[in-house]
Image: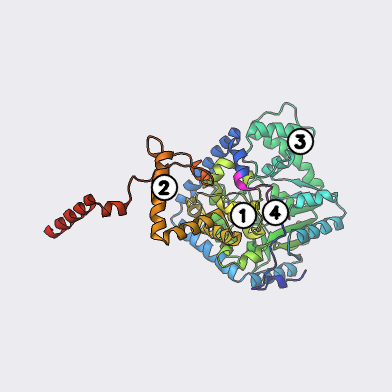
């Protein structure tokens, strides 16, 4: 695969419509309505996000230089984006020198084809997988299944989602929308030979999953992973996790295939120090990751003897070319923004219809897959899935200004959409305000309509179409009985102005 697509300023087009797992089936507002009616879901989300949020605040408060670490992380990521083609070339060179093979994938289709070809070359019809957002993004499991290859998720939460035939709803905790009773039922239905008396005690559930997975670890010859970081200086790849299942995947199989988004590269080994402090505190509220796995190419007699690195673009180069939107590529997938977002806490991840939910998903998904000029494009609604409260910016360990990016994406959508209700309303307002007589007549009409529509408390609770969407979620104060211009022209107003002038003179 040629690497010329990394050259600026002519990036490849974003991923085609419907490719991979970057597009939902319906716009966010419509999907969110159904999720809001699920009281169990809301209860699960509320408990989980508040617990993680409290832990994060505790461990970040321990560090006197937390803000300096955030600044360092942001600066390293900015430097990386500025030199991305150069750093990727260096990463390829170092991985190759260490005995690995690098493949370049322009989009989901190419990445899936590469992985499928590599797995088939081993003669295996199954793989074990480390939790990976990149492989979810490209729909790798579904692609492999369609070609007779079974992918076994080994992360506990991903296993729960897979056995339930469900979809992940959180970047870090994919099964956050499930409680322990639901998980017990999923294991009873989905794990062969599980004890029919299995209860909902977390330790017992984990033991059941461990027994199920241990055979897969010992017998499967091919593993597929993602990567949290790739070090250009040394060709080293890194995966951080909490369970140890990932390390089993990374060390036991004969062949390891890693799919990594091109934005995950870091310039130097020393840079890893910053992110190994930022990531665990921001994601799980831990001081350090229980398992941090690092590997460089192939080492004879130790670990996989065949290593392949698939560098995935899938819209990232197009995002990189956007002077504003490229900031989203700095994301380290910690999920801190999800855990503080009032919108995510109430609707969960499924309403976003993409691999990447929450505030960063509302930015990243339109950046990677684009917002198409169709009437009901699901991605075009995502930038509006936010209250713009700014909590996500405060929580982000690399200081991504998510609210500003959301506003910019809204601006881009409006510019491309042509005659939107907002634009038509602004044009109508401009036409009225440009003519004093029309403006005065509009004020009078508003006063009359306001008196008719307002209740006894002088608030309007229901507006006619097309303004019903506004009044469905908020009340509107009725227009005042008179305008400033009316008051200014009245005898009463003139008298008050003269009195104010005399008071000012006396001072």
Residues under labels 1 and 2: Cα distance? 33 Å
Q: Residue at x 38, y 34 (%)?
A: 456
Q: Residue at x 50, y 59 (%)?
A: 427
Q: Residues within 10 Å of mark 3 (few under 14, many from 20)?
A: some
Query: Can residue 477 be seen in the rendering of this structure?
Result: no
Q: Quadrant of residue 319?
A: bottom right
Kindly state the secondary structure of the residue where label 4 is placed.
helix
Mark whose residue sits in front, 3 or 2: 2
258 part of magenta stretch: no
Q: Position of residue 18 (x, y in %)?
A: 72, 54
Say which residue label 4 marks: 137
Residues under labels 3 and 2: Cα distance? 62 Å
Q: Residues within 10 Å of mark 1 (few under 14, many from 20)?
A: many
Say which residue label 2 marks: 446
What are the residue bounds of the magenta stretch?
A: 18-29
* Disc on the earlier residue, 2 or 4: 4
Identify the mark at residue 380; answer none if there is no mark.
Answer: 1
Identify the mark at residue 190; answer none if there is no mark.
Answer: 3
In the image, taking residue 156 as reference, residue 74 lies left or right, namely left
Q: Residue at x 49, y 48 (%)?
A: 59
């Amino acid at each position: 695969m040629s690497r010329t697509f990394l050259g600026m300023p002519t990036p490849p087009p974003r991923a085609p419509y419907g490719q991979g797992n970057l597009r939902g089936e319906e716009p966010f507002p419509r999907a969110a309505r159904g999720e809001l009616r699920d009281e169990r879901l809301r209860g699960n989300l509320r408990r989980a996000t508040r617990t993680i949020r409290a832990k994060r605040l505790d461990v970040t408060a321990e560090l006197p230089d937390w803000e300096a670490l955030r600044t360092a992380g942001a600066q390293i990521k900015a430097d990386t984006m500025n030199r991305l083609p150069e750093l990727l070339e260096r990463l390829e060179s170092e991985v190759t020198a260490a005995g690995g093979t690098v493949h370049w994938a322009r989009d989901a289709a190419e990445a899936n084809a590469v992985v499928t070809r590599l797995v088939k070359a081993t003669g295996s019809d199954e793989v074990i997988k480390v939790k990976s957002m990149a492989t979810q993004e490209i729909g790798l499991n579904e692609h492999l299944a369609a070609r007779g290859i079974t992918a076994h998720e080994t992360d506990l939460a991903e296993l729960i989602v897979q056995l339930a035939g469900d979809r992940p709803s959180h970047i870090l905790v994919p099964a956050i929308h499930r409680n322990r009773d639901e998980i017990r039922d999923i294991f009873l239905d989905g794990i062969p030979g599980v004890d029919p008396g299995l209860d909902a005690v977390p330790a017992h559930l984990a033991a059941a999953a461990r027994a199920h997975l241990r055979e897969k670890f010992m017998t499967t010859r091919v593993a597929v992973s993602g990567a949290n970081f790739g070090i250009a200086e040394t060709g080293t790849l890194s995966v951080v996790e909490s369970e140890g299942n990932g390390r089993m995947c990374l060390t036991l199989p004969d062949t390891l295939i890693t799919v990594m988004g091109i934005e995950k590269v870091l310039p130097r080994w020393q840079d890893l120090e910053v992110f190994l402090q930022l990531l665990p505190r921001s994601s799980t509220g831990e001081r350090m990751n229980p398992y941090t796995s690092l590997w460089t190419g192939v080492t004879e007699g130790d670990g996989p003897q065949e290593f392949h690195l698939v560098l995935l673009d899938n819209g990232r180069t197009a995002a990189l070319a956007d002077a504003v939107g490229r900031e989203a590529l700095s994301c380290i997938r910690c999920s801190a923004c999800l855990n503080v977002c009032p919108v995510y806490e109430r609707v969960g991840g499924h309403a976003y219809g993409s691999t990447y939910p929450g505030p960063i998903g509302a930015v990243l998904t339109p950046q990677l897959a684009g917002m198409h000029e169709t009437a009901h494009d699901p991605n075009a609604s995502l930038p509006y899935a936010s209250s713009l409260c700014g909590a996500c910016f405060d929580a982000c360990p690399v200081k991504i200004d998510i609210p500003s990016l959301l506003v910019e994406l809204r601006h881009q959508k409006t510019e491309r959409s042509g005659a939107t209700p907002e634009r038509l309303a602004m044009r109508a307002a401009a036409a009225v305000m440009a003519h004093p007589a029309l403006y005065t007549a509009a004020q009078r009409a508003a006063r009359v309509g306001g008196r008719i529509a307002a209740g006894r408390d002088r608030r309007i609770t229901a507006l006619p179409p097309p303004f019903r969407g506004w009044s469905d979620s908020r009340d509107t104060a009725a227009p005042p009985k008179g305008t400033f211009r009316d008051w200014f022209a009245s005898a009463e107003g003139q008298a008050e102005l003269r009195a104010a002038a005399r008071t000012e003179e006396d001072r």
